[in-house]
Image: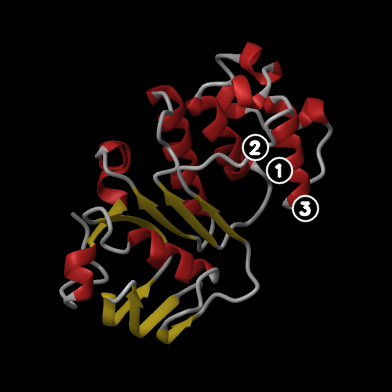
Amino acid sequence: MEIIYVTNISKTFNDRVLFDKLSYVFSPGLYHLKGENGSGKSVLLKMLAGIDHSYDGLIEGITDKEILLLDHHGIGVPFLSIRDNIALAAYLCGCPFSVEKCPTNLYSNEKRYLMEQYVSSSIGNQMKVGLSLLFLPIKWTLILLDEAMNGIDQISQAMIFQKLLEITKTSDAIIIIVSHTDQAQKFLQAELRIINLVDLKCGRCDLDEKK
């Protein structure tokens, strides 16, 4: 079972204290991390992903694992088509697909957009390139979605949330979603653990509490 142990994490950014001896244990499942802008949500996700190491304290439990971190920035190459970008992203993740067989689940109702140049596509279609990686045959250990569904239509959101549920039921993945909307709560309901960063900083979060 994959478990992340966050122990006495402290971090200062631009002379402002973001975290002061923050501790928590993430067990497998779905989490919705909530908090005000600038409260440190994105910073915490980067720390969990192993991108940001400039902190005091310990984060243990996941090393050299399959980690997917997506934020509100698209991951596509501007001059390639949407489909070519999905195939390229899959290849870089170790899943070499032919362009014709790359996972295009999120475009099932709008396949005409697959041949559009990435730079000319809508924000939603650009964001779906990264989110298509959820449908790869990879056993993700940690999935971090930081406002990654901005501009995504509700049908595609439902497909994404359904896939996240499937992942949690078939693996020990830890999935943390940051979103200013309540769509995650609407679709995932009882499966979702809601964490308010203010409560987390104050040590008021119960690991097993679901709201």
Say which element carries label 3.
loop
Q: CA distance from mark 1 to mark 2?
A: 8 Å
Mark in the foreground, 3 or 1: 1
Give residue 12's quadrant in the image.
bottom left
**Position in image of residue 34 (x %, y %):** 25, 55
Q: Residue at x 50, y 63 (%)?
A: 172
Mark in the foreground, 2 or 3: 2
Residue 112 vertical placement versus 26 (above, below)? above
- Give the amino acid type for the residue marked by disc 3 in the picture: Gly
Instruction: Specify the quadrant that holds the C terminus.
Output: bottom left
Instruction: Give whichever of 91, 44 is nearer the camera.
Output: 44
Q: CA distance from mark 2 to mark 3?
A: 17 Å
**Position in image of residue 170 (x %, y %):** 53, 53
Q: Residues within 10 Å of mark 3 (few under 14, many from 20)?
A: few
Q: Is residue 107 left or right of residue 115?
A: left
Please tell me which of labels 2 and 3 falls first in the chain. 2
Task: Identify the residue under disc 1.
Answer: 89
Report the disc number at residue 76: 2
Q: Residue at x 30, y 52 (%)?
A: 192
- Check if mark 1's residue and mark 2's residue have beta carbons within 8 Å: no
Report the disc number at residue 94: 3
Q: CA distance from mark 3 to mark 1?
A: 9 Å
Instruction: Give whichever of 180, 175 is nearer the camera.
Output: 180
- Give the amino acid type for the residue marked by disc 2 in the picture: Gly
Say which element carries label 1.
helix
Q: Residue at x 26, y 37 (%)?
A: 186
Name the colouring of the figure.
Answer: secondary structure
Count of numbered marks: 3
Find the residue positioned furthest to the front.
Answer: 14
Instruction: Give whichever of 195, 193 is nearer the camera.
Output: 195
